[in-house]
Amino acid sequence: MRKITTIFLMIALMIYPLAGIVTEVNYAEDVVTVQDGAGNLWRFDGAEDWGVGDLAALLMDDNSTEDIRDDSILLVRYGGRAQWAY
């Protein structure tokens, strides 16, 4: 049981939630760009239902490094509309 708990804890430390606002949607290339609160830009595929000003909830993997620039998006969910932002 302890081994399972340790593995779960290790995975939990590598995965974190992140919220951002969609700043660009490139329908031709099927890419969405999201800016988080720290100003970092993240991109993911699947532009069909996204628009500028949408809120995105991202589940991130830190790839076991301290440098946020190499983190990976694991999952994206629509979080509503941020009309006040744009």
Image (cartoon, rainbow, N blue to C red):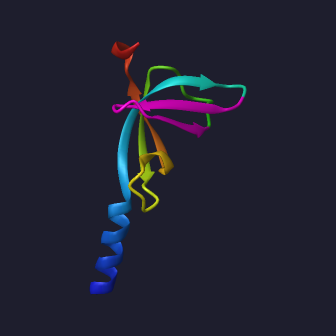
Q: Position of residue 7 (x, y in %)?
A: 36, 76
Q: Position of residue 28 (x, y in %)?
A: 72, 26
Give the overall secondary structure of the magenta segment.
strand
Horizontally, is 69 left or right of 10 in the view?
A: right
Above/below status of 80 relative to 64: above
* Residue 43 lies in the magenta-colored region: yes
Above/below status of 9 relative to 82: below
| Residue drawn where x is 38% and y is 61% of the image | 14
| Residue drawn where x is 64% and y is 25% of the image | 26
| Residue drawn where x is 35% and y is 33% of the image | 38
Residue 31: quarter of image: top right
Q: Position of residue 44 (x, y in %)?
A: 57, 39
Most foreground residue, 65 or 85: 65
Residue 32: quarter of image: top right
Q: What residue span does the magenta drawing correspond to?
A: 29-45
Q: Quadrant of the C terminus?
A: top left
Can residue 72 be seen?
A: no
Q: Quadrant of the N terminus?
A: bottom left
* Residue 23 lies in the magenta-colored region: no
Can residue 17 be seen?
A: yes
